[in-house]
Image (spheres, rainbow, N blue to C red):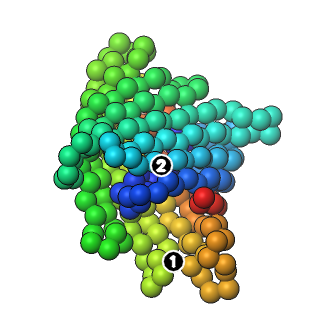
Amino acid sequence: MKKIVLLFFVAVTVSAANAQNVQLHYDLGRYLYDDDFNGRPLFTSTVEMFKPDKWGSTFFFIDMDYKSTGVASAYWEFERELKFWSGPLSVHLEYDGGLAYVSNSYFLGATYSSNSADFSKGFTFSALYRYIQKQSYDKPHNFQFTGTWYMYFGQKRTCSFAGFFDFWHEKNPNGNYIFISEPQFWVHLNKLAGFDDAFNLSIGTEVELSYNFAARDGFYAIPTAAIKWDF
């Protein structure tokens, strides 16, 4: 897996506090794509952190894939939203990098954010220039569109549906465009009767929807079973 989740909804729903979480995902892809996913790591951990300040916000996450011998691969993203004004637009700076097939990527663009009055739902959309360092096909200059969303359900916001999509131009063996989206559904146990409010464990699932991603040809839908702890 490249990245398990980009819960940027934290950035638009938390305006004055830090937010961190740790996730563990069990990959179910090998049970759907036996031939293609032989040897694929079963577990992936994700660590996320978001921190706002008076000049914008900082967000990063780190993914690590695990085999029985240890860590098989790693990936991280670091993002900075710059905003010295009021309004829904901000300047977006980003770095992506990792092991194995991942090349260094640098981003510059703009992000538009929108939320409902009670912050029960919202979305962001970013239009970005993407420079892929030492791109193997000698096409380092590309574009990318990124969107994120979140929705809460239930009287106490017991459940949430959130995720992201990335669509970008990058010449690859299977074409010139790549798409990935990772919607997640969570049940927040501390919102249920019988659980302490401080018991910040959530259980849920994610589905990686991708096209020509990670050197795979065509469309794939890869679900996970997951747990998450919010700090």
Where 136 falls versus 183 (above or below)? above
**Left or right side of 221 for 123:** left
Q: Are marks 1 and 2 in contact (CB under 8 Å)?
A: no
Residue 84 in picture, x, y percent from top left: 24, 42
Q: Which mark is residue 50?
A: 2
Q: Residue at x 49, y 53 (%)?
A: 18
Image quarter in which the C terminus is found: bottom right
Asked which quadrant contains residue 73, the reply is top right
Q: Which numbered disc flags the more N-terminal residue, 1 or 2?
A: 2
Asked which quadrant contains residue 126, the reply is top left
- The residue carrying mark 1 is 158
**Count of numbered circles on the image:** 2
For the question of whether residue 171 can be seen, the reply is: no
Separation (CA) of disc 1 from disc 2: 22 Å
Q: Nearer the viewer, residue 74 or 18?
A: 18
Q: Amino acid at mark 2?
A: Phe
| Mark 1 secondary-structure assignment | loop
Mark 2 packing: few (<14 Cα in 10 Å), some, or many (20+)?
many
| Mark 2 secondary-structure assignment | strand
Residue 136 in picture, x, y percent from top left: 43, 15
Where 31 falls versus 144 (above or below)? below
Image quarter in which the N terminus is found: top right
Mark 1 packing: few (<14 Cα in 10 Å), some, or many (20+)?
some
**Left or right side of 16 for 145:** left
The residue lying furthest to the front in this view is 54
The residue lying furthest to the right in this view is 69
